[in-house]
Image (cartoon, grey):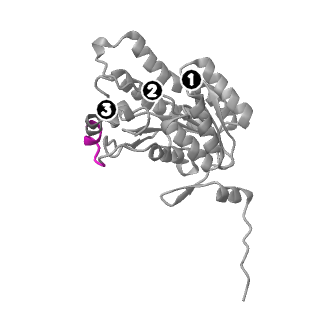
Amino acid sequence: MLGPVLVPISSFEFLTSLFAVSIGGVMISLAGRAALITGGSRGIGAAAVKMFAQAGADVVFSYFKSKDAALQIQQEAGKHGTRVEAFKADAGKQADNKSLVDHCIARLGRLDILVANAGVWNQEDLPIEKMSEKQWDEMIRTNLKSIYSVIHFSVPHMIKQKSGKIVTISSTAGQRGESLHTHYGASKGGIISFTKGLATELARHNILVNCVAPGWVATDMSNPVLETKTGQKMATTMIPLRRAGTAEEIAGPILFAASDLANFMTGEIINVNGGAVLCG
C-alpha cells in the first residue's frame, strides 16, 4: 500500500491554513495584513477586532473611554497569535487620529486595511427645534469628521503601497433618515456619500472603499432600547427577520469587504439589516 502523498504548499498557503475564518463555508484569510479599526473596544468594533485577528491580521484598534474593556478585547483577540494592540484616541480629534495612524505604522510597519467604525448614537429623542448647535456639532464631529480624519491620515500610506482597503460604517439611518435623531441620520448619510466619492477618487491607487450599513444591532449602545418591551417591539416590527442583529453578524460583512474576495468591489453600500431597508 502506498503511503500518503505530500503536496508542497507555499508559505502563504501555509499561513492561510493557520489563520482563516469560515463564513458560509468560505475561508477568509487576512494572514500578513495590517489592520486599523477605530472604536474597537465594544460592539461591532470589538467583534471586528476579534474576527480580524482570528483571520490572521495584525490589528491596532482605538478606544476612548473604557481602557479596561479595550485591554480585555486586546487579550481575547491576541489569543489567535497575531499582534493586537489598543490605543487611546478621541475619534473626533484630528491630532488623535494622526497619532493613531502613526502608532499603527510604527507598530505594524504598514497599513493594509482601515475600518472606520467609531461612532455614537443617543437614544434620547431630540426634535429639531430643541436640538442645540452643540448637540449637532458633537454628533457630526464624532460620527462624520472622525471618518474623514482617520482616512485623511491613512490614505498617504496606502497610496505609497499602491493598495489598500477602507471600510466605513454607516447605518440604515443614513439611507432613510431618522425622525427625532436627524443629526445622527445626517452624519451617517454623509458617510455614504463620502464613501462613494472616495471610491472613485482612490481607485487609481488600487485603494478600494466600501461601506457596511447595519440596522438594529444588539450592542451596549442600543441595548437600553432593545431591552425594553416597547423598544424591542418598535425595532423588530420593521425588520422582516423579526430580530436585531448581533455584532458578529455585522463584523462578518466587514471582514468580507476587507478580504481578497472583494477585490473587484468599490463604492458599494453593504446593507446588513435583516431586510428592514431594501436598497438596490
Name the mark nearer the viewer: 2 or 1: 2
The x, y position of residue 247, in whole percent, is 46, 42
Q: Residues within 10 Å of mark 2 (few under 14, many from 20)?
A: some
Measured in 3D between alpha carbons, the distance from the residue under mark 2 to the one under mark 1, in whole angstroms, is: 16 Å
Q: Marks 2 and 1: CB-CB under 8 Å?
A: no
Q: Is 175 situated left or right of 83 in this image?
A: left
Please tell me which residue is depicted at 34% across the width and 37% down the height of the picture: 227
Secondary structure of residue under mark 3: helix
Measured in 3D between alpha carbons, the distance from the residue under mark 3 to the one under mark 1, in whole angstroms, is: 25 Å
Q: Residues within 10 Å of mark 1 (few under 14, many from 20)?
A: many
Q: Residues within 10 Å of mark 3 (few under 14, many from 20)?
A: few
Q: Nearer the viewer, residue 195 or 103?
A: 103
Q: Amino acid at mark 2?
A: Val
Secondary structure of residue under mark 1: helix
Asked whether the viewer can see residue 113, the reply is no
Residue 45 position (above or below residue 139): below
Q: Marks 3 and 2: CB-CB under 8 Å?
A: no
Q: Which residue is denoted by mark 3 in the rendering? A: 176
Secondary structure of residue under mark 2: loop
Q: Looking at the rendering, in which quadrant would you find the C terminus?
A: top left
The x, y position of residue 226, in whole percent, is 34, 37
Q: Nearer the viewer, residue 176 or 220?
A: 220
Q: Looking at the rendering, in which quadrant would you find the N terminus?
A: bottom right
Closer to the chain start, of discs 3 and 1, is: 1
The x, y position of residue 234, in whole percent, is 26, 36
Q: Which residue is denoted by mark 1 in the rendering? A: 149
Please tell me which residue is depicted at 71% across the width and 79% down the height of the picture: 4
Magenta stretch, residue numbers:
234-241
Q: Is 277 situated left or right of 54 in this image?
A: left
